[in-house]
Image (tube, grey):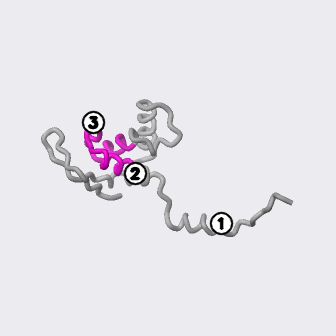
Amino acid sequence: MEILKLKKEITFEGTRYTELDLSGLEELSGEEYGSLCKQAENLDGMDMIPEKSLTFAYLAAAKVTGLPYDFFKKLGAKDTCRLRYAVSSFFSARTKRYQRLIAQKVCHQPFYHFAR
């Protein structure tokens, strides 16, 4: 995972932040992931894809950066959008090998006509 450079610097509790290190996402365990999903559900209600919610992004970023949940509410709109995209992309990303296998499988599927 990358370092997310903030478009708009933020000062929180006397400290200035220009970037967020989200590399800790790689180290999350399945148990921690489940806990994040449950916390997001408790705050927002049931979501079909919790990884795409803003609440989940805030919770995950708070977990891996050590910053409080309220810190992320102070981010500018552009940085908030970029954070949500970075977190959701991390959890939904597929490897190039997987994408290539899927493409091969789809390309080699027989095409059926249902109209006779």
| Amino acid type, residue under disc 2 in the picture | Tyr
Tell me the kind of residue under disc 1.
Lys
Q: For the magenta stretch, what is the residue range?
A: 57-85
Q: Which mark is residue 89?
A: none
* Residue 108 at x, y percent in the picture: 69, 69
Q: Say which label, 3 or 2, has the lower sequence index.
A: 3
User: Which residue is identified by label 1?
Assistant: 105
Residue, disc 2: 85
Main secondary-structure element of the magenta-colored stretch: helix
Name the residue tied to disc 3: 70
Q: Quick one: label 1, few (<14), some, or many (20+) residues within 10 Å?
A: few
Q: Residues within 10 Å of mark 3 (few under 14, many from 20)?
A: few
> Where residue 32 appears, x then y in whole percent?
41, 42
> Magenta stretch containing residue 8, yes or no?
no
Question: Which label's residue is closer to the chain start, 1 or 2?
Answer: 2
Q: Quadrant of residue 15?
A: top left
Looking at the image, residue 83 lies above or below residue 101: above
Q: Is residue 104 left or right of residue 25?
A: right
x 59%, y 67%: residue? 101
Residue under the image location 45 percent in, 39 percent down? 37
